[in-house]
């Protein structure tokens, strides 16, 4: 096929770039989380061109550096503007995830020691403004040691599998929003598998939480809702028992919140708020001092979710009203707090209040620079602000863009 020129459709361009790369439809589909039939439908024009998030996934999978190669609009826009560059430790984390070698004669780390290391890693992830760099340093060794422990037969193997699932759940936070979508699916699938191998409904539910997000971000709404509901059904018999740990209720609430998010993303107002109210009720039953470590599920984070639902549903007034009712400092996780500021910025951006949106993006940068640096929504807003800055703020916008790593 020849290089498409002029006004060739997006699907035609995707097909040409895929074939130029020597990539089959099933391979591209796997990298972007869709089916080969969906890729074919896009390429042949039976489906409308994908929206920006999916175009970015396709561009990254095809190693396209300029979105104009996909859109054909003639205006070069670097994929890095929206997707960001890969973190410096991504290669080492990838190697650890795909290293299947058994080291003969090497004594595996004790599961007790691995559990302590994992617990410390979660704490570091939540308190660190440079959380991605911190995880990038910890994960390669933690992944390899946990994999080694889970491969060795014996009485501690089931516990080792639980820990390995937790390591993959932690790795999900590192690989997300980087130009490696295949790793998002890899860690989500492996965490699910370890949960099933351990035959542990709680670990399965925690792993499901990450998978729901991967499916949601790929537009696979029904699949996301289906596996969330299945995980919650598996937990349900345990939730009324006094001896059941609060974290089992916490992950059930976190899954309910994710179902609300899926409905909001697809524009279903009533269903979104129905599930949000159920999740918020669970958070309030657990009390103001409770926080689920993996998901940050808590009363403050459910309030932050209310802002996100308003944004996704294009109800910016509702989003901002929810934001005003929340003291963001009560969100314990520093990266999650930074993400909340980005969501508030999105609400202001929908109202075309550029100065207020910029103020929230600055706050996100000050809170956790490695959250905003890899957030596509934030980068997209900054790209727009560089092109049309608020009055008297051009220099400030360009400086923040440089700090975030946005080409200006």
Image (cartoon, helix red, strand yellow):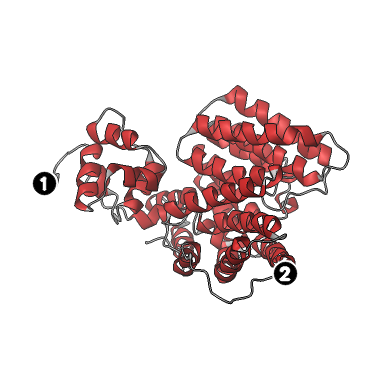
User: Please, is residue 114 above or below residue 10 in the view?
Assistant: below
Please give the name of the residue rendered at 27% of the width and 27% of the height, measured from the top-left corner. 46
Q: Mark 2 or mark 1, which is nearer the start of the sequence? A: 1
Along the line of sight, the residue nearer the viewer: 395 or 338: 338
Dividing the picture into quadrants, the one containing residue 282 is top right
- Dot 2 corresponds to which residue? 113
Along the line of sight, the residue nearer the viewer: 10 or 404: 10
Residue 299 in view, yes or no: no
In this rendering, position of residue 132 left or right of residue 322: left
Give me the C-alpha separation between circle 1 and circle 2: 57 Å
- Dot 1 corresponds to which residue? 2
Please give the name of the residue rendered at 65% of the width and 36% of the height, measured from the top-left corner. 231
Query: In front: mark 1 or mark 2?
Result: 2
Residue 21 % position (x, y):
23, 53
Residue 292 in view, yes or no: yes
Residue 365 % position (x, y):
56, 60
């Amino acid at each position: 096929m020849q290089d498409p020129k002029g006004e060739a459709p997006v699907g035609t361009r995707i097909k040409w770039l895929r074939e130029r790369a020597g990539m089959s439809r099933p391979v591209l589909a796997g990298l972007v989380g869709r089916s080969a039939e969906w890729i074919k439908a896009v390429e042949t024009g039976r489906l409308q061109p994908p929206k920006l998030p999916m175009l970015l996934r396709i561009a990254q999978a095809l190693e396209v550096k300029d979105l104009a190669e996909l859109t054909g609009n003639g205006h070069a826009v670097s994929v890095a503007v929206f997707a960001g560059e890969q973190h410096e430790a991504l290669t080492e984390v990838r190697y650890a995830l795909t290293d299947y070698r058994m080291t003969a004669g090497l004594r595996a780390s004790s599961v007790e020691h691995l559990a302590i290391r994992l617990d410390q890693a979660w704490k570091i992830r939540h308190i660190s403004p440079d959380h991605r760099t911190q995880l990038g340093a910890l994960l390669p060794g933690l992944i390899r040691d946990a994999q080694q422990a889970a491969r060795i037969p014996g009485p501690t193997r089931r516990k080792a599998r639980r820990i390995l699932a937790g390591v993959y759940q932690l790795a999900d936070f590192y690989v997300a929003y980087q130009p490696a979508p295949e790793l998002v699916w890899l860690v989500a699938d492996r965490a699910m598998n370890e949960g099933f191998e351990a035959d542990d409904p709680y670990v399965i539910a925690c792993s499901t939480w990450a998978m729901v997000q991967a499916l949601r971000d790929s537009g696979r709404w029904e699949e996301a809702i289906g596996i969330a509901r299945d995980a919650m059904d598996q937990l349900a018999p345990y939730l009324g028992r006094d001896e059941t740990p609060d974290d089992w209720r916490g992950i059930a609430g976190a899954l309910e919140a994710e179902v609300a998010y899926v409905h909001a993303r697809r524009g279903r107002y009533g269903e979104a708020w129905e599930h949000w109210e159920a999740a918020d009720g669970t958070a309030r039953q657990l009390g103001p001092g409770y926080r689920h470590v993996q998901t940050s599920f808590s009363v403050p984070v459910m309030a932050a979710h209310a802002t996100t639902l308003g944004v996704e549903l294009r109800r910016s007034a509702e989003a901002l009203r929810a934001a005003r009712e929340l003291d963001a400092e009560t969100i314990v996780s520093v990266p999650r707090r930074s993400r909340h500021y980005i969501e508030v910025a999105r609400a202001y951006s929908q109202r075309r209040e550029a100065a207020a949106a910029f103020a929230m993006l600055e706050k996100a940068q000050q809170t956790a620079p490695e959250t905003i640096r890899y957030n596509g929504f934030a980068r997209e807003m900054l790209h727009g602000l560089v092109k049309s800055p608020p009055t008297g703020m051009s220099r400030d916008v360009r400086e923040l863009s440089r700090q975030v790593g946005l080409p200006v």
